[in-house]
Image: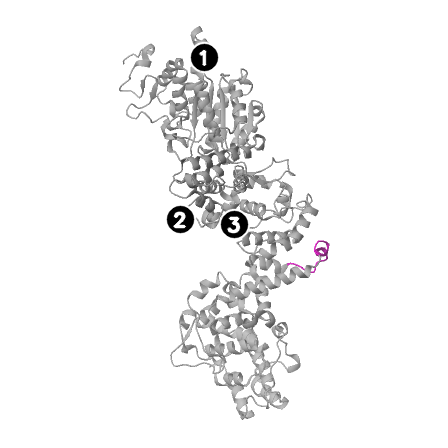
Amino acid sequence: MSTIDASNISNSIINGGSLTWVKGDLNLHPQDASRDRASGAFHNSAERFDAPKCHPQTRRAILREIIEWVQANNGNDYPFLWMYGPAGSGKSSIAQSIAEVCAETGQLAASFFFARTAFERNNASRLVATIAYQLTISIPSTTDQISEALLQDPAIFSRSLQAQAEALIVLPILNLAKGTDEGHAECSVAPKFILIDGLDECGDGGSQRRILDALWSAVRSLNIPLRFLIASRPEHDIRNFFNQGTVSHLTRALVLDDKYEPDADIRTFLLSRFNDIRQGHPSGAHIPSSWPTEGEITSLVEKSSGQFIYASTVMKFVESPRHWPSDRLDIIFGLMSPGRNTPFAELDSLYAHIFNSVGAHIDRAMEVFTFLLFKASDVGAGVDIVEDFLCLREGELQTILTDLHSVIHVPEALETTQQLRLFHASLGDFLMDRSRSGNFFVGVREGHAQMMRYCLRRLTYSFSSPLREFPASSSKIADVDLFKRTEPAVQRMSYVGLMRHYPAAYSSHGLLQDLYLFNFEADRLQRYLDNPQILHHRYLSQVDTYLKASLARYPQVPASFRLFAASTLDKFPRHCRIVFDILSLKYRKGYYSFPHGGAHSALSNGVRELDTTALRFSFADNRGIESFRDMVNEFLTDEARAGIYHVDAGKYMDLAPFLIDLLANPHLFDGVEGIGLWSMQKCCFDLLIDILWCIPADHELAQYLYGNPIMKYAKHLDAKQQEQMIRAVSFYIEKCNRNPATVAALRQQAMAPAGLVPRGEDRLPSPRASRLNRQEGPSPSSDTVTTGQDTTAFKKWVSGLFKWPT
């Protein structure tokens, strides 16, 4: 086994092993010189050529503050400087400027710029190797120590980050300081500043925490004279680390907020870049000196909200040499269509990544953003107010917004009266533009509708959500103290919100159902609204507009109107799906239905799918939408409101013979076999029973019943349903024939022997008839069912009607 002379290792090449070290370059595999370090992470790497940095004349105060910390002799008092701020606030630009200044003055020991989209720079695996490599250049005397560590453990980069940092960063510097006088002297003047930017872009929270733990161990346990600048967004795991008691005492936190007057810096940046366009753009000579106007500059500054990314994105778009600058600025302000241009692509990518990282809480988080975007300007956004209004438990907001601190200011847990606020005014533009936000789109009308629903639910303390489109709160009604904190303020806000949000709200199923259930007559409304009836009238108008538009989506054919009529019957929910099947059947060629009932037409195949996004008749058996169904029924049975969709006696008179056809002649329809005869009969009998109780006497319908005996197919009905059918027919017989003697004869001959039809005084009235408030039509002009038909014929008809199959 050969012996290696460590004294000459800095000029040696070791072959056949796992290490190559030539003039300060270290790698574990000679065949791949870049495997263990990320060359693109250096502040001056080719990969980061023309990296963003602070524009001249901007960020002076914050740059000066950081440089003073770097140069301070008592750096160990604050070995960590955590610079944090919202997404797009300019952290990387500041870090780049600091790195360049410190490199020029010989104060930069190493730097690492993480980047989420760069393979070598989006994880922690190359961090220590990259820093160690830079130390061999900035502090050459550490080379031998680092080389020795690699020789002793060629697999060092498979160890934990803490073990790597101790072997390749901490011990080499400590040994240098404790060694010869020359080494100690070199160490005392050597650069000790290490900059790490974009820590939040390194893997997940666990990786970020492991890096910080390794650096913390290096600083405290071994007491090495190094200082670390960490730049990041205020993500959860990073916040928790720096908020620890022992760490916070040794950390200087520098937050990029209004303290450093970012608006003034952004204005300076914009003016300078617009001046560059006038001087360097191909069309610059033709651009008037008055462009852009002071108002346009101010608007851009306000939209930036103190975050440089918006201003930078705008200028990159406007200064394109292949386009007219003023046209591009008009696109930014929405004065021209962008066409195929995507002026905010960089910004949209940033926002989309942030929202995609939220995970399970995204639905509830979007409710918070909806509140902030659509609340009235005079409504506060304190943590306690928002939690109460959105029906959240105390402290739940912190959990929901854990991963969103880079776009929204979330006060600390105990600062419940502090205000939530969006860091970026441009975030609202992103969320309310479907082409930009995609799955995170918040429509204006939908946003007002959601606010309206929360107003209603907050007033009624209802936490249930019958429809999926409105996520149920995790809170429970049993939390009796839930609303004690802000009861008066939130209640007042909810009452006033009813009037503010309703005119612009989208009439979703959920909103209409909540309105239907809400008590507009409550005394408490009088405390906040001058005239609650105004809101009720607005509600009815909105409901009617919505329902008419929804009904108009169905094919305007007789089959659809039969569906509307059937939906108002009591037993419809039992058979809502089979009704669709029945109304989709087609008469066989050559057969004609009830002559005055309107031509038969089958529902097309697409109607059922359409129904799922319209009025959901096919879901009438869902108990969660009972109140919505009642609301639709009230509309359909109110002639003044429903207009052409009004379900009156005529609509039932059209549906009845269709049902009779199916019961008496099922073989005349195509597709009956696919439905099932038993299911079809049960459905038709139930609906026909409801109809006969509420329609007026009609000669033609009675004659149609006479010509189409239905009971011979009733063998599948149970005794209860048979009795219900006979009661309904008996009731209708009396409507069609008012002669007492004839009715008595019919009862005695056809029904009394069966023991199924009660005496007239015992017969139960129709509950449906009273609820629909139907008016009976005129009585027949004679004692018989039809003119010219004698009593004997009518008796035969009744006998045939109730003749059971053998």
Segment colored magenta: 518-529
Q: CA distance from mark 1 to mark 3?
A: 57 Å
**Which residue is at the front of the view, 737 or 648?**
648
Q: Residues within 10 Å of mark 1 (few under 14, many from 20)?
A: many
Label 1: element kind: helix
Tag of residue 187? 1
Residues 99 and 394: in front is 99
Query: Who comes first in sequence, dot 2 or dot 1?
Result: 1
Going from N to C along the chain, the mark reached first, 1 or 3, is: 1
Structural distance between the alpha carbons of marks 3 and 2: 22 Å
Q: Residue 777, labelled with which disc?
A: none
Whether 522 is among the magenta residues is yes
Residue 303 x/y as whole percent: 53, 41
The x, y position of residue 462, in whole percent, is 63, 53
Q: Which amino acid type is shown beneath numbered disc 3?
A: Val
Amino acid beneath label 2: Arg
Q: Secondary structure at mark 2?
A: loop
Say if 19 sits above or below 327 in the image.
above
Q: Where the N terminus falls, by quadrant?
A: top left
State yes or no: discs 1 and 3 in contact (Cβ < 8 Å): no
Residue picked out by circle 2: 340
Q: Nearer the viewer, mark 2 or mark 1?
A: 2
**In magenta stretch: residue 306:** no
Asked if residue 692 can be seen in this view, the reply is yes
Earlier sequence position, callout 3 versus callout 2: 2
Residue that label 3 marks: 442
Point out residue 609 in the picture as x, y percentages from the top left corner. 45, 62
Q: Residues within 10 Å of mark 3 (few under 14, many from 20)?
A: many
477 relative position to 674: left or right: right
